[in-house]
Image: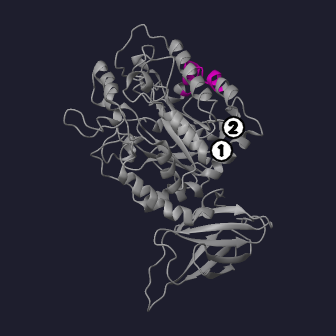
């Protein structure tokens, strides 16, 4: 992704490179729709599945999984290890001779994603090191030509996804520390700098590889570009200048048009350049409520621990509870959640990752109605948790109240407390716990533009208790 990974790296460091760009994009978010060169009223049709899906698996896998974060005694590297450890160009290339992930099983990966409750997968086809995890005729620096493995994992993953209806997307790094025509100046680093580098030649190479990825692997739902902080050129001027120069350098709109000619329904993230964006990608943080309200679509991408690529020394894993809360927080704002795992060099997803994902998945499957195909909460998010919503076929509106803080109580003193949904004039129809059997009902009353729900008894779930609140009619907000 965007920075050499360190154990327990703070979010403000992770945000260091892409932060200024994201900030500018957020400031200019009101203009996002207007600057889309291909915008039309039916664009949301291709985004519909994505809005319903909510939750995806990000996969960072490549040569960097072989050292697994360690080089010359230092154990804090990730997928940026080539640059972070300043590994000589030929020595890093030599890792390909050792890459033989014989335990890779695409069906198993897809099953893990399904058990986790995920609805789509995005995998690295090429990261900043330039090594291609697919069969490309435009370079021999790929998994077919350079490794003893000799198989195309993207093809196997595409087939496995197709069998079960899992949506598939490809990550593609614009930055390339290996290609001779990606100049050192665009990133501040290159494994083998070429003073005669011609970016137009590199862009043609990139476009040719994108044609391969969009032609040889069936329906691809997402192109997830990453530039790793390249083209920022801080000494050349402010980030605003980058916003204008970046798409011209990369022929971004031309590239987008080529992509759409091959797969018209594909969606593209915000890192190819101005004028090509379907959705924003806040990295390693969940936005605060309201901060992305002006942005049409967004997807938070975060790691399951402190690394994108596999790091055998990394122990800072998220708990299932943290994953559930981050998923709900994103869904409550109408956003998606892309959670990354870094498979090991043998082709297996780390067993710890797998168990954490399955643990979160148990809650997600039980409470799926409150997450998938929902919309953002209609009022500011409350301090007791988050709200998602959906319109009902009878014209009413259903709110899902995700209560993070439910007092434990005891058998002798059952829990009794109230939560408030402020800012609505609707009359409540019913309120009940989503997952209890038999159904546990609660009282709900309208009180001067707020709805008060009285909760009692044991909490339905120790991680996040979902209370369903049905309201009469469509949302009517209280006039201030």
Of the 4 image quadrants, the one containing the C terminus is: bottom right
Residue 284 point in image, percent of width and height: 44, 46
Q: Is the magenta stretch mostly helix, strand or loop?
A: helix
Q: Is mark 1 on a helix, strand or loop?
A: loop
Residue at 36% across / 31% down in the picture? 63
Q: Magenta region: which residues?
A: 243-256
Question: Which class describes the residues within 10 Å of circle 1: few (<14), some (14-19), or many (20+)?
Answer: some
Tag count: 2
In the displayed structure, would residue 113 be above or below residue 226? below
Return the mark for residue 350: none
Residue 86 within the magenta-colored segment of the rendering: no
Q: What element carries label 2?
A: helix
**In front here: 159 or 371?**
159
Residue at 73% across / 39% down in the picture? 43
Residue 289 point in image, percent of width and height: 55, 55
Return the mark for residue 33: 2
Residue at image mark 1? 296
In the rendered structure, the answer to whether residue 41 lies left or right of residue 320 reads right
Question: Which class describes the residues within 10 Å of circle 2: few (<14), some (14-19), or many (20+)?
Answer: some
In the displayed structure, would residue 49 be above or below residue 231? below
Distance between the alpha carbons at the discs numbered 1 and 2 = 8 Å
């Amino acid at each position: 992704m965007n920075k050499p990974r360190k154990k327990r790296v703070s979010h403000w460091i992770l945000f260091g490179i892409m932060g200024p760009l994201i900030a500018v994009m957020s400031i200019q978010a009101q203009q996002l729709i207007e600057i889309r060169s291909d915008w039309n009223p039916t664009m949301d049709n291709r985004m519909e599945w994505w809005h319903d899906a909510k939750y995806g698996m990000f996969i960072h896998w490549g040569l960097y999984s072989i050292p697994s974060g360690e080089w010359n005694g230092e154990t804090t590297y990730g997928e940026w290890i080539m640059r972070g450890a300043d590994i000589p160009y030929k020595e890093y290339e030599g890792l390909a001779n050792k890459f033989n992930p014989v335990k890779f099983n695409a069906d198993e990966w897809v099953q893990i994603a399904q058990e986790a409750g995920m609805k789509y997968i995005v995998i690295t086809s090429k990261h900043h090191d330039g090594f291609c995890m697919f069969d490309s005729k435009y370079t021999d620096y790929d998994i077919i030509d350079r490794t003893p493995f000799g198989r195309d994992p993207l093809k196997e993953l595409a087939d496995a996804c197709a069998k079960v209806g899992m949506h598939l997307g490809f990550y593609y790094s614009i930055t390339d520390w290996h290609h001779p025509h990606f100049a050192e100046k665009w990133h501040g680093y290159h494994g083998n700098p070429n003073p005669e580098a011609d970016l137009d030649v590199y862009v043609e190479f990139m476009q040719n590889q994108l044609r391969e990825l969009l032609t040889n692997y069936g329906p691809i739902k997402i192109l997830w570009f990453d530039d790793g902080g390249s083209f920022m050129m801080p000494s050349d001027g402010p980030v605003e200048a980058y916003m204008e120069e970046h798409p011209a350098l990369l022929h971004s709109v031309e590239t987008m048009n080529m992509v759409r000619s091959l797969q018209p329904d594909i969606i593209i993230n915000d890192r190819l350049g101005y004028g090509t964006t379907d959705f924003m990608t806040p990295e390693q943080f969940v936005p605060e409520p309201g901060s992305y309200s002006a942005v049409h679509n967004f997807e938070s991408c975060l790691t399951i621990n402190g690394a994108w690529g596999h790091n055998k020394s990394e122990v800072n894993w998220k708990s299932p509870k943290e994953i559930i809360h981050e998923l709900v927080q994103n869904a409550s704002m109408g956003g998606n959640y892309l959670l990354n795992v870094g498979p090991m060099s043998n082709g297996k997803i780390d067993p710890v990752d797998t168990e954490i994902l399955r643990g979160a998945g148990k809650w997600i499957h039980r409470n799926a109605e409150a997450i998938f195909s929902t919309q953002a909460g209609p009022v500011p998010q409350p301090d007791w948790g988050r709200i998602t919503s959906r319109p009902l076929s009878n014209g009413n509106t259903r709110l899902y109240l995700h209560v993070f803080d439910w007092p434990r109580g005891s058998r002798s003193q059952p829990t009794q407390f109230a939560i408030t949904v402020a800012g609505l004039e609707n009359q409540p129809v019913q309120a009940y716990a989503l997952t209890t059997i038999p159904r546990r009902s609660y009282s709900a009353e309208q009180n001067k533009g707020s709805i008060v729900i009285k909760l009692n008894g044991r909490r339905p779930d120790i991680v996040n208790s979902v209370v369903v609140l049905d309201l009469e009619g469509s949302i009517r907000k209280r006039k201030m």
